[in-house]
Image: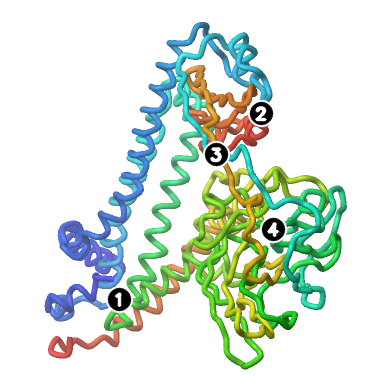
Amino acid sequence: MTKLWWAQVKAVIRLEMKKTFFARRGLWIYVLALLPLLLFTAHTVFTSRDREKSRQIARQSEKALTRQDLLAVKTGMTSEGVIALLGKPPVRFHWNERRAIRVTSAVTGTGGSGTPVNLASEYNLNGIYTDSTSFTSDGLDGAGYVYSSNLLTANRILNGIQFNLGPANQLDAVYGTGQLIKLPAGQFATLRVLAAAIYGPVLHQTITVTYTDSTTSTFTQSFSDWCGCVANPGEQPGESLAVMMPYRVSRNGTQDDQESYLYGYTFALNPAKTVQSVTLPDNRNVVLLAATLATQSQGTKAGPSGQVSFADVSHENYHYSDGNNDLYVDLADGKAYIFTTRTTCPKMPWFSPEYSSFSTYASRSSSAAWESS
Amino acid sequence: MNLFRGEILDKSLHFYFLAPIRREVLMVGKFLAGLLATCVIFVTSEVLQIIVFTGQFTPNVRDLYLYQNHGLTQAAAYLGVTALACLGYGAFFLAAGMLFRNPILPAAAILVWEGINPFLPALLKKFSVIYYLKSLCPVDIPSPPGTPPLLSLLVSNPDPISAPVAIMGLLFVSLLVLYVSSFQVRRMEINYTTE
């Protein structure tokens, strides 16, 4: 019986094979099987092309380089030092970086005009710390970074208007929860605030000023990010760069090398009405540090305004190769940065204990990764 | 999936059912034919992938890997894993094609279940084909420093089982599914007008 069954199975297989291989419904099986092959082919083509380029560059080098030669180049070396080690670069190119070089910030000190709003009862955020002070709070941005009180100081005057900032190392900033902040009674022409956004620009936020007769003035304002790591600071309409600082303070008290910004905003009030309160946006990513009410005559005198000047900083890049490993050196400010390294002939990870990554390291800090590879 | 479902759509399954042959035998024959075809297609693809991948290296490096660093053994292991994948998934898809009028939905459910396998608790992971297949892969892919934990989970199997257990497990599950399917094929009725 088993013999008969087996013969029948073989007969069915014979009948089915043609149908299975050439069935239109089975086309997707072929596509599924071919997809990884296409990926491998594309990878091989690109890798081979890169390796050929690397070999070409290696051939153009003044002297034959080894991987050890490339590893000898360290961040911080001078252009002459790099050339002395590796010879004249076979490939070199220039590019310009747009960099902020001069900032006219709000001046420090007291003596400005206006009626500062007391935000003390509203502080809900630790946004300012003195340098070298470690802290356990989440900081301004929730990730442990804050403004430096050494840079920001306690008082600033922007366009003649006085701003009083909160006390460092304690609750000193207000993030938006839609809260209502009481304003000093009086008739004012403008409400000026120093504020910023965190985690990227925050767009189209509503701020409402309520007068004693229960009428309101509503403003829609976008806020730029406080950190220099985000492109185009201070580009939102109605926003001016009030204070630009070269660094932030991190949780362990050290100076982070990211620039930080604080912006000024002006909201025109109805000067015929008496202000009562201001309602902030209901958004955790909008942070307010100071607010001042000003009359018509205040804030019109010429004074420092938040302006930033940019200049092109020249970068020179060298590209070396030993045929298998590429080294890109960026020279700027008289120093070398190893900003990209790449192994064009990757060792298979299971092939050798000395594992070299396929990936391209694309940051200046990658030199450590390169050196440890 | 189309072994039986395709025949129903083509209105040709009754030719098989009218033949003097046990339905279980028919099912086994169809399954083996499908398994053979998918193995040929996917194993061929795998062989070509290995050839293309090793082709990017210089002959010296390639020979060193293939003949002195277990390259051939690893290539053979991958081919075996591919064949076992055809067996495991084939059994499940055959069952899906017989149990459901529209087998696309259960097939999609199986693929989703297999896809989320790395994120499942240890016990649930074992109710999948991919868990056993990953245990059989000869190379543990290293996660470079800085790889997001979720991505690391996708590429590595933190709790693999031994190769014999994985192979026996896959064979056992496939046979179990085929056994269950054999009951279904015996009860199967054809009514083309309702399709």
Which is more foreground, mark 4 or mark 3? 4
Which mark, residue A310? 3
Task: Say which quarter of the image contains residue B162.
Answer: bottom right
Q: Residue furthest front?
A: A297
Residue type, label 2:
Glu
Mark 1 and mark 2: span between their CA atoms?
Answer: 55 Å
Identify the residue position indicated by label 2 in the image: A371
Vertical placement of residue A344 versus A280, above or below = above
The x and y percentages for residue B163 are 56, 53
The kind of residue tagged 4 is: Gly
Which residue position holds label 4? A160
Of residues B38 and A166, the one nearer the viewer is A166
- Residues at marks 1 and 2, common chain? no
Q: Are marks 1 and 4 on the same chain?
A: no
- Is residue A276 visible in the rendered image? The answer is yes
Judged from the image, the secondary structure of the residue bearing numbered disc 2 is helix
For label 3, count other residues whose C-alpha is less than 10 Å away and answer few (under 14), some (14-19) or many (20+).
Answer: few
In which quadrant of the rendered image does the N terminus of chain A lie? bottom left
Q: Please state which of the two labelled residues, at mark 1 or mark 2, is closer to the viewer.
A: 2
C-alpha gap between disc 1 and disc 3: 67 Å
Q: What percent of the width, then of the height, locates residue A178? A: 64, 81
What residue would you read off at disc 1?
B97
